[in-house]
Amino acid sequence: MARQRKKKRTHLGASNGPNNGVKSNSSGSRDPKSMVVRIGAGEVGASVSQLVKDVRTMLEPDTASRLKERKANKLRDYTTMAGPLGVSHLLLFSRSNTGNTNLRLALTPRGPTLHFRVETYSLSKDVQKAVKHTRSSRQEYLSPPLLVMNNFISPPSTDTSEPAVPKHLETLTTTIFQSLFPPISPQSTPLSSIRRVLLLNRELTKSPSNGSSVDNGSYTINLRHYAISTKRTGLSRAVRRLKAAENSSKDSKKRRGFINLSKVEDAADYVLDPSAAGGGFTSGSETELETDAEVEVMEANARKVLSRKQMNTLRSSNEKAGRPDHPEVEKKAVKLVEIGPRMRLRMTKVEEGVCGGKVMWHEFISKTKEEAQRMEKVWDARRRETEQRRRAQRENVERKRKEQGKPQVNKAGEDPGKLSDVNEWDEDDFDQDDVMEVDRQEGGVSVG
């Protein structure tokens, strides 16, 4: 009897089946996914368009690197599709009427949103032209970069005046940038998977009295992107050249770098004799690489998984023989090579929602406590009106279902009166006109 066919492509249990497809943007331990977008695709210019491509490359692999924008696309198009596609971060590049390049970093589906002005930037191609040895391997972009943040929390100051940026907003900014990449576990993450570094450094001025870092009144971040280069240390120049020649001989496209051994009788003479064929140790500094630091890492050799009994037997034999129980450690020199892009970002505003809502902080406009309290009352009234409209919509849906004689619970056991994330997205976008009207009435800024 013939075996029954089992469908594996589109049915339950398949790689692209119903339970294994794109996960929705619901809360939980999901991996962050980003989308870098040009708002006004034909108006930002060629340089900003190339900058968007460089930022997409920098955020790989968890980003939409092949996204195609249109002039007719609006912000609502991207926010509506963020939920079904599982997008957690939106990076929106735009250009104002005065020619300033702006960046908005928003968390979906409910915010907040950080507004930055891109004061200066350099494209990846310009950065790589200035670097002596560039890195162009695509293997580096198969894993997310290592995020390094510096000076994001300003040090405590003896001055009694209020800081330019509140402490809770500094913590919020730190959390948003940290959530842009998946967390790294030092115990389980292999070192070979960390191939890039994303450096974010906040600019702080030096105090003239004691030389300590103080807040300069603005929140400016310098962004740098590096590739990690590692080499084994403690080897002579001759041994390194032999290793490079071996790697070149394996690659048919790179048949260069072979060593001329016509003046020596044996390869050992080339390695040991300082003057043989121009190799060997000619000076003490020749064996050292121009590196930033040296680290000790365990050898990445494939090892057989042993049971508990076999592991105890191995440890007892190592103790009797006087061998170390831990695996062998080798020294490697670590060097960072900049691959771009560069950006200097100045934060100008923080909003509560996704590119809208109550303004939590503004760099150029401040309000008194009375104005902030009056603005808070206006937003509380708006929230109550929104809840009333949603309650009325649910009641209307239930009333129409009763009139039509349909059950209020569908086949999946879900209550149709409850609004999904997509419906909430649509309602939030529907209320944007009211948000703009309130901003015009109250001056557009409030302080949390």
Image (tube, grey):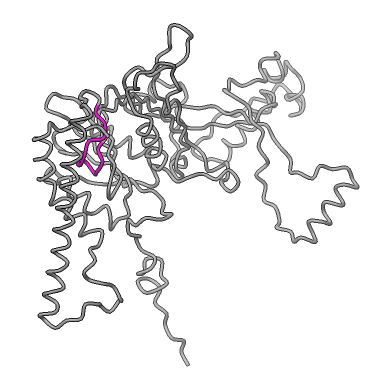
Q: How many marks?
A: 0
Q: Residue at x 58, y 43 (%)?
A: 186
In the rendered image, is residue 65 in sight? Answer: no
Q: Residue sitting at 27 percent across and 52 percent down?
A: 82
- Which quadrant of the structure image shows residue 335? top right
What percent of the width, then of the height, locates residue 415?
Answer: 26, 72
Decide whether residue 48 is among the magenta residues. Answer: no
Q: Quadrant of the C terminus?
A: top left
Question: Residue 216 vs residue 368: left or right?
Answer: right
As drawn, the residue found furthest toward the bottom would be 1
Q: Position of residue 241 (x, y in %)?
A: 63, 27
Residue beneath the point at 35% across and 33% down: 169
As drawn, the residue found furthest toward the front would be 370
Q: Is residue 356 in the magenta section? A: yes
Q: Position of residue 100 (x, y in %)?
A: 19, 25
- The residue depicted at 28 percent of the width and 55 percent of the height is 83
Determine whether, in the image, residue 260 is placed left or right of residue 156: right
- In terms of depth relative to the viewer, which is nearer, 147 or 156? 156
Q: In the rendered image of this protein, does residue 358 appear above or below residue 151?
A: below
Q: Residue placed farthest to the right in the image?
A: 320
What range is drawn magenta here? 351-362
- The answer to whether residue 408 is above or below residue 300 is below
| Closer to the camera in the image, 303 or 169 | 169
